[in-house]
Amino acid sequence: MLIDTPRGMDDLLPSEMALKRRIEDVIREVFKLYGYLEIETPTVEYYELFAAKSGEEIRERMFDFEDKAGRRLVLRPEVTASIARVVSTKLKAWPQPLRLGYIADCYRYDEPQWGRRRRFWQGGFELFGSKSPLADAEILQVSYEVFEKIGLRKQFFKVGHIGILREILGCYGIEEEDQNKVLSMLDRKMRDQAIAYMEEKGVEKNAINAIENLLTLEGQDHEKIFKRAEEILSPWEKARKCLENLMEIIEIAKAGGVNAPIIVSPGLARGLEYYDGFIFEQGVEGVQISFNGGGRYDRLVELFGGKPTPGVGCAIGITRILQYLLEKLPEKPKPPRPKTLLIGVPNVSGKYMAKVASELRRLGIPVEVEVTGKRVPTAIEYAVKNGMKFAVIIGEKEEREEKISVKNLETKIQVEISLQDKHRIMEVFERS
């Protein structure tokens, strides 16, 4: 009998869940700050939804299967396609711009290693209905804000524009499907294979040389990088326009408070095939793998039958951030638990124990009931060890008189209160 989790899928213990919830709370806080409405999509989707534009690497790693009716399904490998499906159908009449957020689990058949799990969580921001550089810059702003609020101070961005490479390739009749193959190879650091494929498809030598130069052009000296990129792209006007678009996005993001290093990488490529404009990755110093990534996808909603709707977004890697913080924090966070332990002295009835716990909870006081029969000193020791502040002690006398004894475990002061005196009960708990 198998009693462990499937490979690459993890149990999260209470302290790990407490930290995960903290990360999610930050993401939801930023949802509210910027006006993103949270939605949820199914974990199981039709295969075709992701086969269409998610990219070769993801297609190869999807958990796909047939249901009992023979329909091909997948465990979602990412969420943007699902959100675009919702926008093209159930939200097609909603006014735009439309800001949507999500927190969801995803599945890919990756080789498990640091930062790569077969089940992982993402928190996403998706903005539909605007082609403005303000929209692209906003995705950088929300990403920066999430990292700042989590406490990832050594964050940085790497930004590019997939349109630069697409426009160069398009000038030589390279169809989108072949463009996707080149970009996928570049994303996977298969540079020699990408160059050989471009040569095979008839891309001229000067264009291949330009792409090679762009791939090595990267840095934080924006003026120098953009000047050199403009020189390289001088024969391709549309590609140069994409570069200008990237420059404007960066300027707006910086003016909007993105106070982190921004590495400009004109030759940056990402594996998802639906990207057609600005793209980026976000990481933390000293870690080779990115914690966030995203970009512009202006044709995805239309692909799923919706009206032409530009979009831009990102997917923050909650699982990666969680793993990073668990290794960096001096001690794991303590899971939230009630600050009050209800202890029954022998011979008090279970009915009165349940009644007291119910009355306290009705007043908004979280209570944990001691149900193992510990003696009062042992129960109080348990409460102190678990960071509790109060012990509510009841025995036959308290039950007979409909009272409770409340002991402050910090001050050692104990008071007796009528269970009907709700004002006095609240006063004792709130004042302390």
Image (cartoon, rainbow, N blue to C red):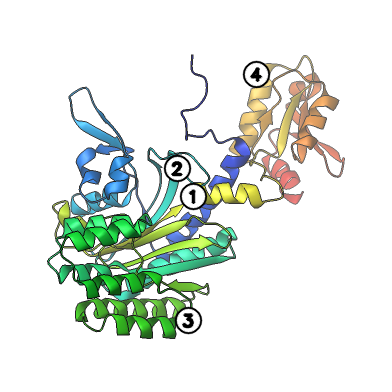
Foreground tag (4 vs 3) = 3
The type of residue carrying mark 4 is Lys
Whether tag 2 and tag 1 are in contact, CB under 8 A, the answer is yes
Q: Earlier in the sequence, mark 2 or mark 1?
A: 2
Whether tag 4 and tag 3 are in contact, CB under 8 A, the answer is no
Q: Residues within 10 Å of mark 2 (few under 14, many from 20)?
A: many
- Which picture quadrant has residue 129? bottom left
Report the Cα–Cα distance between label 4 and label 3. 72 Å
Report the Cα–Cα distance between label 4 and label 2. 44 Å
Per the image, label 3 sits on a secondary structure element best described as loop
Disc 2 target residue: 120
- Location of residue 43 with respect to 169 vertically, above or below: above
Per the image, label 2 sits on a secondary structure element best described as strand
- Location of residue 234 with respect to 213 vertically, above or below: below
Foreground tag (3 vs 1) = 3
Disc 3 target residue: 221
Q: Earlier in the sequence, mark 1 or mark 4?
A: 1
Q: Residues within 10 Å of mark 3 (few under 14, many from 20)?
A: few
Report the Cα–Cα distance between label 1 and label 4. 44 Å
Foreground tag (3 vs 2) = 3
The type of residue carrying mark 3 is Asp
Give the percent coordinates (x, y) of residue 66.
23, 27
- Residue 273 or residue 353, whichever sits in front: 273
Disc 4 target residue: 351
Q: Earlier in the sequence, mark 3 or mark 2?
A: 2
Disc 1 target residue: 318
Q: Is residue 161 visible?
A: yes
- Residue 20 or residue 206, whichever sits in front: 206
Whether tag 4 and tag 2 are in contact, CB under 8 A, the answer is no
The type of residue carrying mark 1 is Ile
The type of residue carrying mark 2 is Phe
| Disc sitting over residue 71 in the figure | none
